[in-house]
């Protein structure tokens, strides 16, 4: 599946993830699904979702089931949150951003949560977010491109947010519930999400979901070494010449002009995008 956040038009970095997941699904004679991860309304751009879908069509990347839109599934995420709370796995947290500032940084730049509210809120404190209890045993998986990846979520990330203080459902919960409900067997996506995968596997196990196979393709960087994104000024794709854009993405993924061989994808987390 390809799961873009509609924060802007499709750019080369998102095309790489879209194309790799599409070709892998086609090679496996499977279905390719598209999902709009539009829960963060402050980051979403009006029209971006439509623009992305039109761009995929223009590129000839056809999806095989109706597009799943996360903002239409709030009740489903709520039900998962309720279940995790009922089972004592999720708990309310009153910590403010300011209060978390002294904690060490996790690999993704967020703060490691030290479990302040794990055993209950301090007197007089109000719940802001909901967090998931984690454990210290390593969670590992064999990534089809990046090899064996392992993380001790409790030490390296901490109990993570399922429901944000602004009321928005956390990315990790939504992704796991959706992959489960959509019956996703294979996740092909950018290597910037490698460090989220152990969290997602932890949640899958708690929710009784099957862990899909993972393949994390290199992320495309600009000349300054930043991940291509709208924020770093990535140019939108030139849809007047879709074949040229597809050819660039194929080369980036180590492929020849035809076919698809996952084994040829460079086994690194990031590569500079060709100009
Ligand atoms: N929506 C996420 C992004 O655009 C991708 C999530 C995923 O593929 O799991 O970075």
Image (tube, rainbow, N blue to C red):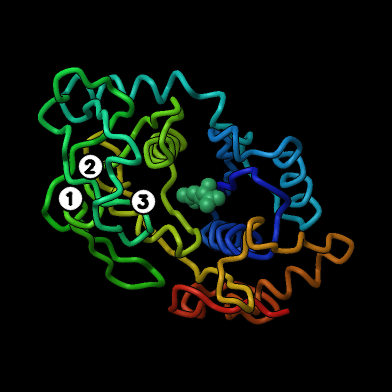
Of pointers 2 and 1, the one earlier in the residue sequence: 1
Q: Nearer the viewer, mark 3 or mark 1?
A: 1
At x 30%, y 48%, the residue is 101
Earlier sequence position, callout 2 versus callout 3: 2
Q: Residues under labels 2 and 3: Cα distance? A: 22 Å
Q: Do the residues labelled 2 and 1 touch (CB within 8 Å)?
A: yes
| Element at label 2 | loop
Observer-nearest of 57 and 4: 4
Q: Distance between the residues labelled 3 and 1?
A: 22 Å
- Whether 190 is drawn above or below 91: the answer is below
10 Å crowding of disc 2: few (<14), some (14-19), many (20+): many
Residue annotated with mark 3:
212
Residue located 28% across and 42% down the image: 160
Q: Does the image show residue 1?
A: no
Dots 3, 1 in contact, CB < 8 A = no
Determine which of the numbered discs, if any, sits on residue 154 in the image. 1
Vertical order, 67 against 28 (above or below): above
80 to the left or right of 268 = left
Residue linked to disc 2: 159
Label 2 to label 1, Cα distance in Å?
Answer: 6 Å
Q: Nearer the viewer, residue 89 or 67?
A: 89
């Amino acid at each position: 599946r390809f799961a873009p956040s509609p924060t802007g038009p499709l750019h080369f970095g998102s095309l790489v993830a879209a194309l790799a997941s599409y070709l892998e699904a086609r090679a496996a004679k499977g279905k390719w699904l598209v999902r709009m991860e539009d829960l963060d309304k402050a980051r979403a751009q009006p029209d971006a979702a439509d623009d992305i879908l039109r761009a995929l069509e223009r590129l000839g990347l056809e999806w095989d089931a109706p597009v799943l839109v996360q903002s239409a599934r709030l009740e489903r995420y709520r039900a998962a949150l309720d279940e995790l709370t009922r089972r004592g796995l999720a708990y309310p947290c009153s910590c403010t951003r300011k209060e978390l500032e002294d904690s060490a940084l996790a690999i993704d730049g967020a703060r490691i949560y030290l479990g302040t509210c794990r055993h209950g809120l301090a007197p007089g404190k109000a719940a802001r977010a909901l967090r998931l209890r984690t454990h210290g045993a390593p969670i590992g998986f064999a990534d089809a491109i990046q090899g064996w990846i392992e993380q001790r979520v409790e030490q390296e990330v901490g109990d993570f947010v399922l429901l944000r203080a602004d009321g928005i459902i956390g990315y990790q919960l939504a992704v796991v519930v959706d992959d489960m409900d959509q019956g996703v067997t294979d996740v092909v996506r950018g290597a910037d999400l490698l460090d989220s995968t152990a969290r997602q596997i932890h949640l899958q196990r708690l929710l009784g979901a099957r862990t899909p196979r993972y393949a994390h393709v290199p992320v495309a960087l600009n000349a300054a070494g930043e991940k291509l994104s709208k924020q770093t000024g990535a140019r939108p794709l030139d849809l007047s010449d879709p074949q040229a854009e597809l050819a660039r993405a194929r080369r980036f993924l180590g492929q020849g002009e035809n076919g698809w061989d996952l084994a040829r994808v460079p086994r690194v987390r990031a590569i500079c995008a060709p100009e």
